[in-house]
Image: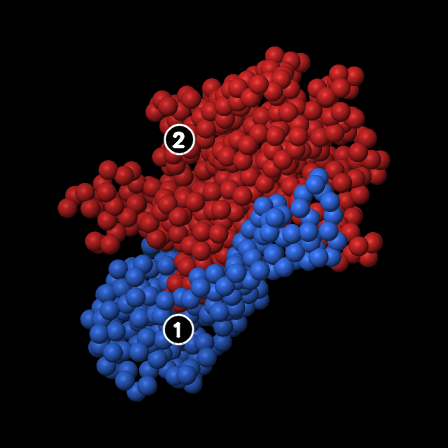
């Protein structure tokens, strides 16, 4: 396992396909690609071997049909043959038509369930299993290529920079298992995926007059997330999310925006001192709320 | 964009200029938001019905099947009618997700999740009836072939009632894993958006740690395809076997060879009607009009019209064959259905199932949401009467005229039926608030080929 990874993030499936083609042509080793939906043709470009799960399902079906035949033969013919309405009770073959429905159902039962169990085990999916997508957005609308770095960082970067990147980040496992060390100078000014994210969200519940509480949300890495009321109660329809302020249609908009600006300064200070390492996540969170 | 081409003549399946992110937001909205008043009112009514059903079931089990309206002649009535009705409704889900997947029908993606949920919930209702009809439901496990300690008697594999046990349980469990496997990526999307720690925990648990690796998706698609291939004959076999409960008997009006295809067509017919009923309400309440468009409703109406016509053909064929067979008992059974004391049930069935879907030939009517909703309810009523007519009218005129009788349901019969309707809606309403009701990962795959914004972009070129 490499100690350092490059995460190349794309915001479109076609851009991802082009990038993967590009990387494969340049013989860059791609460890994993995370996508929010099955991207058609990706497995061919990645040279993934075809899945053998259908063959497994066929074998499971054969097991099911054999099990059904043996079970019914034992129960109805061998162990306790009964004369039911004059049906041929001593011969499996002659009585087979009446056994077809159950044998068929057992074939389907075995094939379907064992195949799904095989799929869950092979893809390591079960309850309490921790998700392994590096950023949560890969289940929404981002596509991520994970490339291990073995001293060839600059070569990989030069290939990636030719592709239609959304963002790129370097993960150094030695430093911190979960921290992102950003190298975005030439790619983008600021990363959306910095280690700490502080932003504004609305509380889902509305007051009777239609306004909602504005909350400040803190996110660190994947796991930690807090939201606290900012003390402001505003109408959602007047919120301009790009500017993080309310429009002039809102009553008291001057006062609210003034308060918001104070908050933003606090947030900026806390974020900076967190990135510098002077305070930890808890302190950053407290410094804004209190 | 070559690989995303779709004929311009096809109507867009996703409207409203969606982006991938917008799809996530729209699907997550009902889960992340709070329930409104209407939801609580409907949920409350469903819960009351459900609880009343439980009271009636407890009364049945503690007192006995004598609390029902059954008598010596009519030994099967509301319970089996309700059982077949619910199983039939449970056929649309797998049909939509499996058969339409094999036929590469993209429009299934807006509706398959809810149709499958409906399948599972209605098969649960269906399963209740045979179990409580046993009288001693705590011995229900006697229907499985276990090496028994009660003597050397096994279950009878010649009996269609045992075939039913295998068919229904296979159908329920396979539908469940099919549904859940499809849900994993969508649960993962909700998990990765979740803000509240409790929500995050729950969706992490149910998403089984889905991460969306390229290899996982490759397997996922193959598993979906093979499951669809397995579920297609399965769904046809289940109602075939349910029809065998009647067709293999010697009761005039029951032992007809047309039953399997006729029951399967009827099941698809009633299943689509129930999907229509539920989705017309859900698309409005959950703001999903961009994903469940009028085109989806129209296509479902066409399926309802075709399967309704197949059912109509089967009714007429039955009548013809009864006459043509020359068997007077058979002839009487059908004459009695149409003109006997239960004529009103027969004509209710004919009107609801054969005549009403014919309105769907008119484009204006099949694209009308209100009209589609009304017809979907009418069809569900009609399909309930179909099973009632087949079961009760065939039984109530026994071989001996001295045994001739009528059936009237007791309040317990009615209570249990209403209880299952309540239970069904309790499950469905909870589902609508906690599950991603649109298969968002699948819808994202067709966005570039069938989204209105992408289609317009291509048309301009």
- Observer-nearest of A88 and B175: A88
Q: Is residue B50 left or right of residue A287?
A: right
Question: Is residue B399 in view from this perspective?
Answer: yes
Give residue A157's quadrant in the image. Answer: bottom left
Instruction: Residue lying at the far right in this picture: please name it.
Output: B63
What residue is rendered at 65% in x and 56% in y? A73
> Could you tell me residue A35's position as x and y percent?
37, 63
Q: Which chain is blue?
A: A
What residue is rendered at 61% in x and 45% in y? A98
Q: Which chain is red?
A: B
Determine crowd level at label 1: few under 14, some 14-19, many 20+ residues with C-alpha closer than 10 A.
some
- Observer-nearest of A269 and B40: B40
> Could you tell me residue A55's position as x and y percent?
44, 64
Tell me the quadrant of the picture where the N terminus of chain B can be found.
bottom left
Examine the rendered structure and indicate whether residue B218 appears above or below residue B109: below
Q: Is residue A168 left or right of residue B176?
A: left
Pointer 2 residue: B302
Residue under disc 1 on the same chain as residue under disc 2: no
Task: State the mark number for residue A272.
Answer: 1
Q: Callout 2: helix, strand or loop?
A: helix
Question: Is residue B118 in view from this perspective?
Answer: no
- Observer-nearest of A209 and B277: B277
Instruction: Report the Cα–Cα distance between label 1 and label 2.
Output: 61 Å
What chain is tagged by disc 1? A
Determine crowd level at label 2: few under 14, some 14-19, many 20+ residues with C-alpha closer than 10 A.
some
Coloration of the structure image:
by chain
> Could you tell me residue B18's position as x and y percent?
33, 47
What residue is rendered at 67% in x and 14% in y? B341
| For discs 1 and 2, the disc positioned in front in the rendered view | 2
Q: Callout 1: helix, strand or loop?
A: helix
Q: Is residue B63 left or right of residue A76?
A: right
């Amino acid at each position: 396992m490499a100690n350092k990874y490059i995460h190349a993030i794309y915001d479109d499936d076609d851009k991802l396909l082009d990038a993967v083609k590009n990387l494969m042509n340049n013989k860059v080793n791609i460890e994993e690609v995370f996508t929010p939906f099955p991207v058609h043709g990706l497995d061919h470009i990645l040279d993934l071997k075809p899945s053998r799960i259908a063959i497994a399902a066929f074998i499971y079906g054969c097991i099911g049909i054999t099990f059904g035949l043996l079970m019914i033969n034992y129960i109805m013919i061998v162990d306790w043959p009964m004369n039911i309405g004059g049906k041929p009770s001593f011969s499996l073959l002659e009585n087979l038509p009446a056994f077809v429905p159950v044998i068929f159902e057992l074939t389907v039962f075995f094939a379907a369930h064992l195949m799904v169990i095989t799929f869950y085990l092979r893809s390591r999916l079960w309850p309490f299993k921790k998700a392994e997508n590096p950023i949560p957005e890969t289940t929404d609308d981002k596509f991520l290529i994970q490339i291990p770095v073995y001293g060839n960082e600059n070569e990989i970067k030069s290939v990636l920079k030719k592709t239609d990147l959304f963002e790129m980040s370097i993960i150094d496992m030695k430093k911190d298992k979960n921290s992102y060390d950003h190298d975005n100078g030439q790619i983008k000014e600021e990363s959306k995926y910095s280690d700490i994210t502080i932003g504004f969200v609305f509380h889902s519940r509305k007051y009777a007059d239609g306004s909602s509480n504005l909350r400040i949300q803190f996110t660190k890495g994947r796991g930690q997330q807090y939201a606290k009321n900012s003390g402001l109660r505003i109408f959602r329809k007047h919120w301009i999310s790009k500017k993080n302020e309310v429009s002039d249609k809102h009553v008291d908009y001057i006062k609210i925006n003034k308060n918001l600006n104070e908050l933003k300064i606090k947030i900026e200070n806390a974020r900076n001192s967190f990135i510098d390492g002077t305070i930890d996540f808890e302190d950053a969170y407290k410094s804004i709320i209190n | 964009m070559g690989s995303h081409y779709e004929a311009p003549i096809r109507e867009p399946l996703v409207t409203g200029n969606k982006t991938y992110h917008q799809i996530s937001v729209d699907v997550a909205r009902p889960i992340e938001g709070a329930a409104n008043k209407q939801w609580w009112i409907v949920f409350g009514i469903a819960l009351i019905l459900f609880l009343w059903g439980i009271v009636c079931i407890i009364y049945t089990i503690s007192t006995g099947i004598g609390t029902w309206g059954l008598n010596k002649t009519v030994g099967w009535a509301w319970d089996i009618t309700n059982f077949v009705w619910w199983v039939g409704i449970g056929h649309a889900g797998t049909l939509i997700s499996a058969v339409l997947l094999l036929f590469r029908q993209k429009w299934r993606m807006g509706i398959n999740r809810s149709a499958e949920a409906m399948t599972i919930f209605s098969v649960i209702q269906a399963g209740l009836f045979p179990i409580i009809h046993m009288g001693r439901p705590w011995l229900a496990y006697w229907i499985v072939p276990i090496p028994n300690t009660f003597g050397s008697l096994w279950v009878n594999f010649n009996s269609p009632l045992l075939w039913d046990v295998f068919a229904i349980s296979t159908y329920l469990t396979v539908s469940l894993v099919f549904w859940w496997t499809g849900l994993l990526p969508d649960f993962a999307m909700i998990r990765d958006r979740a803000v509240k720690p409790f929500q995050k925990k729950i969706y992490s648990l149910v998403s089984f740690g889905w991460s969306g690796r390229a290899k996982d998706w490759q397997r996922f698609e193959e598993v979906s395809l093979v499951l669809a291939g397995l579920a297609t004959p399965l769904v046809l076999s289940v109602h075939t076997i349910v029809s065998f409960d009647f067709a293999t008997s010697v009761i005039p009006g029951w032992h007809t060879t047309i039953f399997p295809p006729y029951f399967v067509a009827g099941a698809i017919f009633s299943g689509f009607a129930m999907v229509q009923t539920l989705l017309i309400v859900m698309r409005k309440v959950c703001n999903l009009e961009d994903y469940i468009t009028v085109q989806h409703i129209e296509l479902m109406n066409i399926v309802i019209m075709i399967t309704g016509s197949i059912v109509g053909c089967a009714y007429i064929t039955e009548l013809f064959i009864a006459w043509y067979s020359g068997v007077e008992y058979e002839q009487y059974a059908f004459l009695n259905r149409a003109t006997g004391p239960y004529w009103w049930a027969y004509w209710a069935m004919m009107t609801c199932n054969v005549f009403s879907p014919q309105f769907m030939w008119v484009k204006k009517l099949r694209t009308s949401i209100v009209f589609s909703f009304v017809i979907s309810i009418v069809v569900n009523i009609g399909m309930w009467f179909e099973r009632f007519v087949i079961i009760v009218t065939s039984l109530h005129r026994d071989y001996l005229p001295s045994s001739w009788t009528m059936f009237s349901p007791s309040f317990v019969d009615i209570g249990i039926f209403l209880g299952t309707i309540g239970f069904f809606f309790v499950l469905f309403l909870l589902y609508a608030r906690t599950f991603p009701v649109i298969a968002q990962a699948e819808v994202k795959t067709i966005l570039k080929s069938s989204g209105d914004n992408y289609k317009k972009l291509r048309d301009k070129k």
